[in-house]
Image (spheres, grey):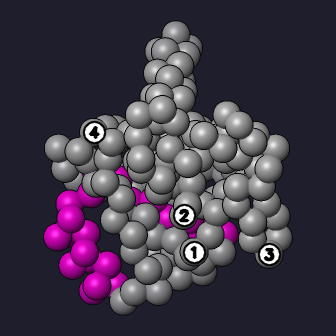
Amino acid sequence: MSALLAERTSAGLAARFEAAAHTDDRPLAAVARGSAHRPHQPALIDSRKSLSFARLRAVILELAAILQQRGVGPGDRVMIAAENTMACVALLYAVQLLSAWPAILNPRSARAEVAALRDCCAPRLTVFAVDDAPAALELSKETGVDRWDHADVGTLVFEPTAQSR
């Protein structure tokens, strides 16, 4: 992606995020309002760290741009194999920001279940959050082709899967 296109994409995602605070009642709107009015207050807390509303906003925008670069757009489905972690929450919001549909997968599901779910929902992309989910790491070793490391959400492995539009 060219630098100019990346800049326009980021600006467009940021504008869409900010608009959610005023026009939307989805959960993303609560994060948008929090980042505008309480940027330094904790938005997510787990046993090891917390993310402020401002940092969560930045992570969501980063993830949305990464998903968009991998072909995710409005109406697409994104399968997320993750435990109940900050990565899972941030991915849910990023998918929502793109007007796509998340399909959450328990990473401990049997391989046959994973295949059946993938066939059923035909996701554009499958994302494995592997740091806190050894089972997701195992699943991603079979098919994941693209890794992305992030300080706040850990390692994500991406697998393009289908044309879901």
Q: Earlier in the sequence, mark 1 or mark 3?
A: 3
Residue 116, horizontal then vertical, whole percent:
21, 78
Under mark 1, the amino acid is Asn
The residue positioned 32% from the left and 47% from the top of the image is 100
Q: Residues within 10 Å of mark 3 (few under 14, many from 20)?
A: few
Distance between mark 1 and mark 2 Cα atoms: 6 Å
Distance between mark 2 and mark 3 Cα atoms: 15 Å
Q: Residue furthest top?
A: 4
> Which of the 4 image quadrants contains residue 133?
bottom right
Under mark 4, the amino acid is Pro
For residue 13, say whether it is visible. Answer: no
The magenta stretch spans residue 127? yes
Q: Residue furthest bottom?
A: 110
Label at residue 84: 1
Under mark 2, the amino acid is Cys
Which residue position is annotated with label 4? 74
Q: Which residues are magenta?
A: 111-131
The answer to whether mark 1 and mark 2 are in CB contact below 8 A is: yes
Distance between mark 4 and mark 1 Cα atoms: 25 Å
The answer to whether mark 1 and mark 3 are in CB contact below 8 A is: no
Label at residue 47: 3
> Which of the 4 image quadrants contains residue 59?
top right
Q: What element does badge 1 sit on?
A: loop
The answer to whether mark 2 and mark 3 are in CB contact below 8 A is: no
Q: What element does badge 4 sit on?
A: loop
